[in-house]
């Protein structure tokens, strides 16, 4: 299943369910056909016992009519009541067995159809999501995205499992039985089906009113998830600031919004189903009254019929009518499920159609590093209207290290993020070895850069898995070497299970400095030609920091390194230092040059080193 196909090929279909089925449904046509035909034939075999019951009553028990069974030649049927009776028993038992086998096919077909679709749409949506631009994630709550990927996809699965299958099952039953009733006794069929337009009218109104209500329910549940996820992530902060009751109130408010939205849809729904049952009941009662009088009086000229209605025929008719009434009331449930699934599908396609992608040229070239020269040429950037970086220019080549210094919020991290194309510069250009990074494939660009940021992310897994992340083919020896270089090996060996110790969610079981050193080991293992360090050693004690930096400098003399550091002692040996103030480079030069300039660097050097 192609990952972005659903959006590009079928986005012109305005009905989301049609769009879903025209792509994913067609891909699973075989399962659909097994389900559909299993359904059709199972329903037909379900209709056989009531038929045979009527025949048995009229021809064997009451002996009003000659013994005959449709589609079977009379010559092949038994002649006497007792063999006829056993023959009918045999047919009924056979129909039950065949029906059971057909139901197995029906269930296999529908379940595999819905499971395949929910799986494919979840991985397609996730794959697309991963390619979206960072500013999409800046604006969206992760909890809401989670809610779409889990809840909405599950809801869709429920519909495909139960609802979609039911549409066919019910349609087959209603249509099939209606035709059969007309075939058996047209006037009585008219009486029994007279309520159908009324059911259609109620259903239409229900659909119209419930649709927006379900959309609201889906939106509020997304917000609720988002709040819960944020709060669970911030649980320590909540405890430290004693904001438990404040947060409980916030959760309560959003949960109440969800409650009200849900309750609104429930009240509409619970009015609808009993109304349908009443209407269906009226149809049944009318059929019973008319048919009952007909059997008792022999004929009923007032409904334009002078033919007799036999008791057995009437029993068959009533049993079939019952089978018709029940699916008609089920239609409401199916429409209900459909509307819920439709609301979910709209949200899923909302993600798939999200076009906020970092643009990659179709003829993008692969980055191959030659002189490792990074050039920022008159680069300006803002996350929104406000400029964060203005007219930044500098170069740094292989074997050089460039340090960026400045107050918090001056744009240092942003400057590095632009090189990774997490965001694109608004003006100017960034080049590596003379090629604009917008002409490079994203994969090859990010492959050549090792980034260690302030916000270290470790997955819930072992230390080894976290170091190996992204360099999955690394050998044990290489992992240990990188860890030694990042001054991590010793503390890792002291953990209960060494490299196999589980670090907990986000690395909660490790200290900040340990987490940073694992992240550095991860970057060193990747061994890229360009390193970006954004306060990568801020939580590490100074002697350890020096050990790491010295190692990097000597082992990686061929690399280009851009580094942001709070502790200026860390970067004093850099080839070049840029000082950023409010997104503008105000000073540049070597450590000594900058001290001599007696500007902001001089101030920072004295304030941070005293
Ligand atoms: P520094 O690394 O120098 O502390 P940053 O580059 O992180 O500064 O941030 C520079 C400015 O950009 C700050 O004012 C910050 O609020 C803003 N900023 C950072 N990240 C984002 C973002 N994802 N969306 C909007 N504004 C941001």
Image (cartoon, rainbow, N blue to C red):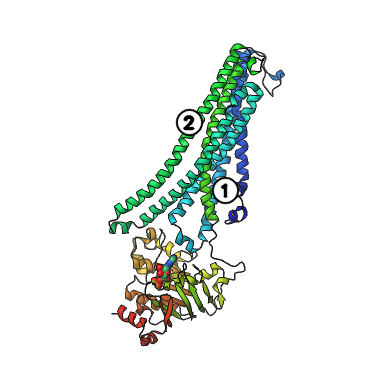
| 55 sits left or right of 245 in the view | right
SS at circle 2: helix
Which corner quadrant of the figure contains ligand 1?
bottom left
Residue 138 pos. (x, y %): 45, 62
Residue 241 pos. (x, y %): 28, 59
**Residue at the (36%, 88%) spot, across then down:** 596
Identify the residue under disc 2. Answer: 274
Identify the residue under disc 1. Answer: 16
In the rendered image, is residue 92 in sight? no
Q: Is mark 2 within 8 Å of ligand 1?
A: no
Q: Relative to the observer, which residue lies in front, 37 or 294?
A: 294
In the rendered image, is residue 599 in sight? yes
**Residue at the (53%, 48%) spot, across then down:** 345
Quadrant containing the C terminus in the rendered view: bottom left
Badge count: 2
Position of 74 relative to 29 (above/below): above
Label 2 CA crowd tier, 10 Å (few <14, some 14–19, many 20+): few
In the picture, residue 600 is in which quadrant? bottom left
SS at circle 1: helix
């Amino acid at each position: 299943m192609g990952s972005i196909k659903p959006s590009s090929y079928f986005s012109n279909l305005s009905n989301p369910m049609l769009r879903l089925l025209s792509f994913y449904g067609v891909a699973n046509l075989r399962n659909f056909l097994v389900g559909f035909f299993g359904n059709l034939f199972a329903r037909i075999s379900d209709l056989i016992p009531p038929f045979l019951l009527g025949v048995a009553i009229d021809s064997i028990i009451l002996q009003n009519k000659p013994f005959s069974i449709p589609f079977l030649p009379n010559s092949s049927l038994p002649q006497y009541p007792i063999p006829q009776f056993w023959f009918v028993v045999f047919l009924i038992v056979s129909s039950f067995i065949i029906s059971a086998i057909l139901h197995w096919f029906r269930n296999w077909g529908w379940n595999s159809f819905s499971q395949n679709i929910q799986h494919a749409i979840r991985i397609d949506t996730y794959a697309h999501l991963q390619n979206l631009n960072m500013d999409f994630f800046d604006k969206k709550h992760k909890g809401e995205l989670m809610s779409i990927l889990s809840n909405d996809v599950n809801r869709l699965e429920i519909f495909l499992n139960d609802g979609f299958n039911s549409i066919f099952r019910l349609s087959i039953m209603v249509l099939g039985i209606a035709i059969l009733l007309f075939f058996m006794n047209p006037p009585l069929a008219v009486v029994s089906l007279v309520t159908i337009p009324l059911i259609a009218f109620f259903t239409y109104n229900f659909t119209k009113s419930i649709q927006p209500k379900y959309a609201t329910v889906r939106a509020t549940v997304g917000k609720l998830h988002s709040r819960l996820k944020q709060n669970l992530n911030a649980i320590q902060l909540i405890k430290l600031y004693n904001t438990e009751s404040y947060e409980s109130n916030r959760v309560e408010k959003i949960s109440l919004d969800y409650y009200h939205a849900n309750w609104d849809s429930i009240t509409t729904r619970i009015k609808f189903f009993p109304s349908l049952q009443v209407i269906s009941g009226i149809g049944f009662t009318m059929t019973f009254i008319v048919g009952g009088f007909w059997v008792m009086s022999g004929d009923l000229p007032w409904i334009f019929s002078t033919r007799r209605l036999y008791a057995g025929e009437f029993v068959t008719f009533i049993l079939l009518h019952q089978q018709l009434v029940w699916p008609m009331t089920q239609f409401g449930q199916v429409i209900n499920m459909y509307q819920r699934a439709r609301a979910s599908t709209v949200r899923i396609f909302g993600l798939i159609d999200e076009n906020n992608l970092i643009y990659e040229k179709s003829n993008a070239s692969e980055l191959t590093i030659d002189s490792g020269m990074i050039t920022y040429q008159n680069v300006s950037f803002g996350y929104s209207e406000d400029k964060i970086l203005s007219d930044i220019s500098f170069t740094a080549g292989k074997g050089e290290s460039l340090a960026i210094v400045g107050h918090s919020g001056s744009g240092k991290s942003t400057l590095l993020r632009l090189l990774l194309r997490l965001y694109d510069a608004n003006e100017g250009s960034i080049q590596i070895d003379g090629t604009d990074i917008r002409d490079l494939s994203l994969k090859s660009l990010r492959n050549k850069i090792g980034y260690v940021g302030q916000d270290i992310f470790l997955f819930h897994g072992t230390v080894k898995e976290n170091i190996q992340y992204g360099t999955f083919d690394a050998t044990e020896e290489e992992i240990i070497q990188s860890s030694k270089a990042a001054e991590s090996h010793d503390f890792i060996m002291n953990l209960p299970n060494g490299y196999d110790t589980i670090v907990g969610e986000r690395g909660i079981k490790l200290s900040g400095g340990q987490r940073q050193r694992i992240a550095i080991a991860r970057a060193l293992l990747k061994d890229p030609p360009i390193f970006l360090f954004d306060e990568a050693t801020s939580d590490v004690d100074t002697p350890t920091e020096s050990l790491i930096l010295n190692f990097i400098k000597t082992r990686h003399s061929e690399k280009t390194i851009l580094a942001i550091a709070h502790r200026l002692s860390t970067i004093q040996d850099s080839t070049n230092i840029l000082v950023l103030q409010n997104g503008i480079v105000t000073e540049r030069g070597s450590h000594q040059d900058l001290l001599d300039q007696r500007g902001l660097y001089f101030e920072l050097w004295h304030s941070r080193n005293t």
